[in-house]
């Protein structure tokens, strides 16, 4: 006895299509979740890479810092490292500016870091010469974006943190050194207050919270300065992340201050 071919009923087709649509929706939702997670991770990795690049450039500049004052565009003597509180800018002289093409220039360079409140960015500033003329133009580049505020601290030779540089004591010390230099060699080099032993930069960000960078100034600290682990860790640098009110282990506490 032959049986007639029998297909799916309408109800069965509706059930199958419904199940297929449900599975497809679940698969699509899972795929979108994976893609969003991947995009978020890539964004975090890119941000981390930007932070690391900024850290290494800051570290290289400060570690190559030298005690060479400059003459600004007005002919005024400026210290080897100075902090301009109004602009939240630190500028200083660094060495080690490589010259592979053997151009007629010095290996010393004046660099600066400042916070642009309009762009909410940490900026790097360079000058083509040390002793500037009135027409000398600085070059600004964006180092790190999404920065809500910065704070600078300076470690003096007595292992005390200062909120400005040069301090009054450092200025007096620089004046004494200048007088001694003038007495022994009137045609000697420019003299100014010495740079600090270390510099701490605190950066406030919306995504990573509060970041603190600690840099030793110059490859070799002054002979009368004792850099213990509690002040500057081995290697002279710290890249730490802290929550508001947090404490960085093995580092001195910053005096009370509020980031903008």
Image (spheres, grey):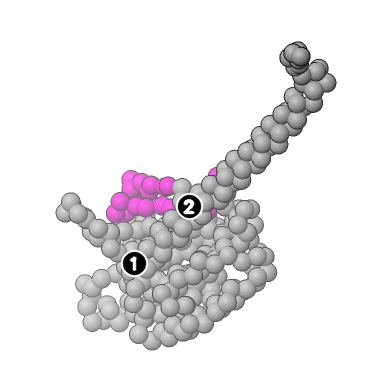
In space, the residues marked 1 and 2 are separated at their CA atoms by 21 Å
Q: Is residue 212 left or right of residue 177?
A: right
Quadrant hosting residue 20: top right
Q: At 52% across and 51% down in the image, what residue appears?
A: 45
Quadrant hosting residue 149: bottom right
Up the image or down, 233 lies above or below 141; here it is below
Residue 123 shows up from this direction: no
**Whole-percent x, y for residue 201 in the image:** 52, 65
Task: State which quarter of the image contains the C terminus.
Answer: bottom right
Circle 2 residue: 50
Q: At 48% across and 64% down in the image, what residue appears?
A: 83
* Residue 119 among magenta residues: yes
User: Looking at the rendered structure, which numbered label has been put on residue 214?
Assistant: none
Up the image or down, 31 lies above or below 94; here it is above
Q: Nearer the viewer, residue 133 or 53?
A: 53
Q: At 21% across and 72% down in the image, what residue appears?
A: 187
Disc 2, SS: helix
Start-end of magenta stretch? 114-141
* Residue 197 among magenta residues: no
Q: At 52% across and 82% down in the image, what residue appears?
A: 230
Q: Nearer the viewer, residue 155 or 3?
A: 3
Quadrant hosting residue 35: top right
Circle 1 residue: 64
Q: Nearer the viewer, residue 196 or 120?
A: 120
**Whole-percent x, y for residue 216 in the image:** 42, 72
- Could you classify mark 1 by the number of other residues whose Cα lies within 10 Å: few (under 14), some (14-19), or many (20 or more)? many
Q: Is residue 149 left or right of residue 186?
A: right
Residue 209 shows up from this direction: yes
Whichever of callouts 1 and 2 sits on the residue coming sooner in the sequence is 2
């Amino acid at each position: 006895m032959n049986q007639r071919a029998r297909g799916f009923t309408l109800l069965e087709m509706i059930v199958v299509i419904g199940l297929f649509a449900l599975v497809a929706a679940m698969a699509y939702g899972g795929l979108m979740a994976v893609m969003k997670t991947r995009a978020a991770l890539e964004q975090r990795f890119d941000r981390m890479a930007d932070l690391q690049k900024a850290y290494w450039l800051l570290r290289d500049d400060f570690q190559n810092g030298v005690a060479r004052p400059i003459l600004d565009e007005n002919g005024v003597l400026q210290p080897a490292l100075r902090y301009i509180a109004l602009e939240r800018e630190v500028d200083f002289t660094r060495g080690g500016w490589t010259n592979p093409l053997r151009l007629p220039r010095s290996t010393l360079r004046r660099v600066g870091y400042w916070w642009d409140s309009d762009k909410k960015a940490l900026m790097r500033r360079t000058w083509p010469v040390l002793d500037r003329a009135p027409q000398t133009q600085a070059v600004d580049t964006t180092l790190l974006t999404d920065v809500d505020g910065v704070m600078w601290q300076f470690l003096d030779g007595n292992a005390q943190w200062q909120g400005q540089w040069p301090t009054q004591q450092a200025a007096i010390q620089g004046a004494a050194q200048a007088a001694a230099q003038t007495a022994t060699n009137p045609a000697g080099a420019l003299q100014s207050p010495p740079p600090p032993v270390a510099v701490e930069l605190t950066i406030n960000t919306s995504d990573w919270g509060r970041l603190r960078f600690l840099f030793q100034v110059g490859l070799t600290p002054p002979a009368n300065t004792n850099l213990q682990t509690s002040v500057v860790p081995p290697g002279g640098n710290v890249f730490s992340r802290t929550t508001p009110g947090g404490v960085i282990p093995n580092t001195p506490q910053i005096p009370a201050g509020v980031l903008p």
